[in-house]
Image (cartoon, rainbow, N blue to C red):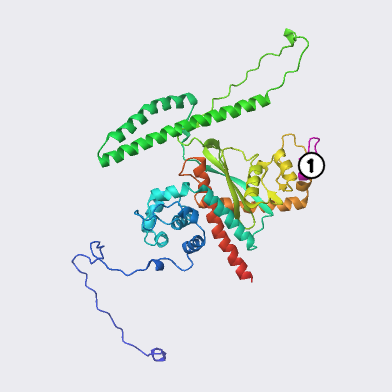
Amino acid sequence: MAEDSLFGALPEQFGPKREVGVGAPRLWEPVRDVIELRAASLDSLIGPDHQARLIWSYVLELDLSDLEARIKAREGVPGHPAITPRLLLALWLYATSEGVVSARLLARLCQSDAAYRWLCGGVGVNHRTLGEFRVDNSERLNRLLAQSVVALAAEGLIDLDTLAQDGVRVRASAGASSFRRRATIERQIADMLPVVAELAKEVDSDPVTNEQRLRKRRAQRAAERLSRLKAAVAKIEEIEARQSKKKEASAPQAAPQSQPPAQSQIPPPQDVKKPKPPRASTTDPDARVIKMPDGGFRPAYNMQVASVAGEQIVVAVDISTSSSDRGLARPMLEKINANYAKLPKQYLIDGGFAKNEDIEWAHGANVEVYCPPITNKHNTDPFAPRDNDGPGMSAWRRRMSSQEGKATYRERSIHECVNARGRKYGLVQLTVRGLAKAINILTLFALANNILQGARLRRIAAAAV
């Protein structure tokens, strides 16, 4: 059958046998002392549709003249040029979208990562400049957030008639063991006062430049420590005043009696548990120990986010130190009204926000609140009208008992996508201390979220044309 094959009978062939060498193996070894000349362009480091280009194009359109007005280096005047605020803002927006929350890490990425190097464009940045910019522009960041929402609404991409709100617990930059009673903090203040005075005296008397710089840094750290201790005492005084006011409001008013009750009619004294004295953190006085989603109690902040649920656009943010969301709907609505001069027609919140006074206030402002009722231990019908219901509560019970109201409330679940994106963007553990700095971290997240989600909405709208 060999002649029936295509090539007929071919002779069997054998290749030469490879001899096994006895010498050392030939390997590619790294050589790092070679000088190379490479021709590279920064613009070729990232693709044309890279996320960094999107953020930079957004920053280029902003009017940052108010930030540039603070710069002291001017033409014709001696001084080192300052880094443009556009670059610092773009770096933080892109870093936030990548989950980078540390200024030191961001400064290192500006030297090693292609996207950050492209944004810098050869401009060197350090962690101090980055950190100061992030915490010193609260009002400007809030205005940028409002402007991003107004721009999307003007394009017809979002509708502010239906909003949703939810809270996210974020761990504070303070240890659980940093909480002290007032007497302990006052002793620490007494110990720190002479230390701060001595360090300040050493800074003024030291003529050596390098040593003076180190002494000045130590004196600055001691002064910051003393400032935090005083802030902790002020926070304890605030808590004590709030507790005293609450105790006076809850104390029963004694009815006037014509004659003193008999000895047998006086009830025996009950064992009342004495409340623990309030404490404050000496690391972050604004932080409070609150209940976390896992059931534990840790120093944290309750970060509130209001959004257009369907489009996942954040319209306003706020921060509380309360473990509960109860009573936080009205402050957020007031902030929305202050930023946009209008209130939503429908407001979706979960049952933890439910408060009769807030629902009545919203009803008076023509805002329909959608939130499920709280399950009570008596197993009574939560939608049944009650004698003390006002017009707002009565309308809320009718609304939530209807199928239309329940269907509308289901839209609130889309807001969980915003919460999940916040975790991805680094809203897990704060690296800054203080309520004022924490709100900037939250606002940066909201602004970065709106830039990227706004681009997604524009692509969808363009594809639908």
Mark 1, residue position: 391
- Can residue 428 be found in the magenta stretch? no
Q: Say above or below: 442 vs 290.
A: below
Q: Nearer the viewer, residue 186 or 339?
A: 339
On-image quarter of the C terminus: bottom right
Using residue 104 as the reference point, say whether residue 415 is left or right of it: right
Q: Say above or below: 39 vs 231.
A: below
Using residue 193 as the reference point, say whether residue 13 is left or right of it: left
Q: Position of residue 272 (x, y in %)?
A: 62, 20
Report whether residue 149 is seen.
yes
Q: Secondary structure at mark 1?
A: helix
| Badge 1 amino acid | Pro
Name the image quarter holding residue 225. top left
Q: Residue at left 53%, top 29%?
A: 236
Name the image quarter holding residue 111. bottom left
Using residue 67 as the reference point, say whether residue 207 is left or right of it: left
Q: Residues within 10 Å of mark 1 (few under 14, many from 20)?
A: few
- Most common SS among magenta residues: loop
Q: Position of residue 228 (x, y in %)?
A: 45, 34
Q: Say above or below: 331 vs 248.
A: below
Q: Residue at left 45%, top 31%?
A: 229
Using residue 110 as the reference point, say whether residue 440 is left or right of it: right
Give the magenta range: 381-396
Report whether residue 177 is seen.
no
Name the image quarter holding residue 82. bottom left
Q: Residue at left 33%, top 88%?
A: 10
Q: Nearer the viewer, residue 28 or 132?
A: 132
Q: Nearer the viewer, residue 403 or 306?
A: 306
- Can residue 382 be found in the magenta stretch? yes
